[in-house]
Amino acid sequence: MIELALLIDTASLIYVFDFIGIIACAVAGTMLAMSKGFDLFGCVLVSMVNAIGGGTIRDVMLDRYPLFWMMDLNYVFTITLTSILCQIFFCPTVRINGVLKFFDAIGLSAFSVIGLTVALSTGAPPPIAVMMAVMTSIAGGIMRDMICQELPMVLQKEIYITACIIGSLTYLGLWRLGVMAWLSELAMLMVVFGVRMLAIRHDWHLPSIRMVGWLIKNEGKK
Amino acid sequence: MIELALLIDTASLIYVFDFIGIIACAVAGTMLAMSKGFDLFGCVLVSMVNAIGGGTIRDVMLDRYPLFWMMDLNYVFTITLTSILCQIFFCPTVRINGVLKFFDAIGLSAFSVIGLTVALSTGAPPPIAVMMAVMTSIAGGIMRDMICQELPMVLQKEIYITACIIGSLTYLGLWRLGVMAWLSELAMLMVVFGVRMLAIRHDWHLPSIRMVGWLIKNEGKK
Amino acid sequence: MIELALLIDTASLIYVFDFIGIIACAVAGTMLAMSKGFDLFGCVLVSMVNAIGGGTIRDVMLDRYPLFWMMDLNYVFTITLTSILCQIFFCPTVRINGVLKFFDAIGLSAFSVIGLTVALSTGAPPPIAVMMAVMTSIAGGIMRDMICQELPMVLQKEIYITACIIGSLTYLGLWRLGVMAWLSELAMLMVVFGVRMLAIRHDWHLPSIRMVGWLIKNEGKK
């Protein structure tokens, strides 16, 4: 009974987190588009790409139709409304700040869990499922940056894909150990969010792997 | 009897308008690609992306296979021929001018009608169908600009997506009122074309929505 | 009996060539990504896009599911390993050199043959199959350049798409003449590789087609 309640809670929690992430993506997309001089609908389109682009690519790759946002119109309405409100009230000089990064981290955790579990549910092998979790989380942001002629931020020295992969491995580990799905999902949600927030707070970056090669070379010279 | 004739006429008209749009897109794509120094096949590829890219993304999103240009080879042949002729005879310093904008507006109206009706025929809800009309009309141009490293023109201050949305709402309104499909299509065709041409002629641009927020703020200060 | 052995050999040869191409693409993608300052997973992602992006777009366009790299995990593992080794040991100042171009030409020939035969096997008409051969060969490189904010190299004055098209026409010609599939594939493999290597060695470029128009104009002036 309690388990059922918790099961429902995890599903609801992911849905709520998903929409927090969608809103954060819509805000980030709109602000970047505004700084590029795009018009009303141009900004809405960029915020759509940012918010649901990753999930769309995942669904197309996995042959899951109809696409998730064609069945649940809440996605499209939420993004459109967020983008328009953002255009009316936000100042274009405001940079993506701490609050947005916090909400974005919530979204990252939800997108990762959804991407991983959706892929596993279609029978994808675990390595592909991890790729789909990463895709769901980052492809939207990459496409946003491509449209706006910027180098994709998430591919640069940030603990972003890393948080998603660590969380996915946590889920797969717990799942292998026989832990219930909802508990594994909850753990993944917290791990992705935790790693991402720690990385933001302590300004962590992935050390350049090049150094390993440099150390090996210099070791050889001694 | 007359109705049947008109029905056929509307379908034929859309097909003819579609190809006028395809040719306009192929010319615009080739000219941009030439200005970037692409070679013969590079220009053909960019013109393909510009002309059939939007419809391809729509069909993939709606799971409609085979893709429209795989069944009707006229698309691929028309684009290739247009692009090659354009490369032989056009001067790269000629900018996209009035004539091309006129033909492009014809294409915009056809692409919008096709995108909307195709989406409705697959059972998509009206808001998604409007999105598909927009997608069919602009995704090709956005991808062309992304390949050519330009900020997408259609997302900037132009009445382009707006014309498509106004036309789509016209269609949906008439459709809800019980007007026959071919008549609604004809009306949408004329509305999209009309709005776009008026915008070009009078140099209309979407006013920045930011001003609304500014007015609200200043109103509060009084 | 000998025919069967050769048939198997051609299939194996294409698989080996395919992986040589995958590795060459992963190396090229990683090196470009490193020069842009992407992190460990950013580089892996760009190398994935470069190596399997073209085949993915082909499979999505032809509605072939599951995607080839979701069934044969060797692709994903090979690319990830190649990219990480490349990041550890390569110097970012090394430019894409002769050896890489040689391996890339092997990959181009394999990608072309696979793209053409896969498209024909799904019943696509020959012109579409040639397009799919081109797509498989170049779409990954184009997307890599789009993500890295570069003008796509393969669309510029290089005999690249041209080699793929000449090879495809060779295959279709032999196929029309009733030559066995494995022999046509072998011929196409050699033609694509040969044309590409000759173009690299002799620094061939596609002459600008604009000159044809210029000649026609000047002829008229006499």
Image (cartoon, coloured by chain):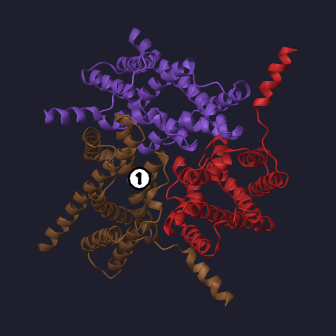
Chain colours: A brown, B purple, C red
Q: Name the residue at 27% across, 74% down.
A: A187
**Circle 1 sits in a helix, a strand or a loop, which is it?**
helix
Residue A208: x and y in percent read 52, 72
Residue sitting farthest toward the left: A1
Residue sitting farthest toward the top: B2
Q: Name the residue at 14% across, 35% down.
A: B220
Up-down relation of residue B116 to residue B41 (above or below): above
Q: Name the residue at 32% across, 45% down.
A: A70
Up-down relation of residue C11 to residue A49 (above or below): below
The residue identified by callout 1 is: A140
Which chain does the residue under circle 1 lie in? Answer: A
Residue A88: x and y in percent read 26, 38
Q: Amino acid at mark 1?
A: Gly
Q: Name the residue at 48% across, 22% down.
A: B105
Q: Nearer the viewer, residue C147 or B188?
A: C147
Residue C104: x and y in percent read 71, 60
Q: Nearer the viewer, residue B161 or A11?
A: B161
Quick check: can you spot residue C159? yes
Residue C1: x and y in percent read 79, 68
Residue sitting farthest toward the right: C222
Up-down relation of residue A140 to residue C103 (above or below): above
Quick check: can you spot residue A124? no
Where the C terminus of chain B falls, by quadrant?
top left
Where the N terminus of chain B falls, by quadrant?
top left
Label tally: 1
Q: Quadrant of residue C95?
A: bottom right
Is disc 1 surrounded by few (<14), some (14 to 19) or many (20+) residues within 10 Å? many
Q: Quadrant of residue C51?
A: bottom right
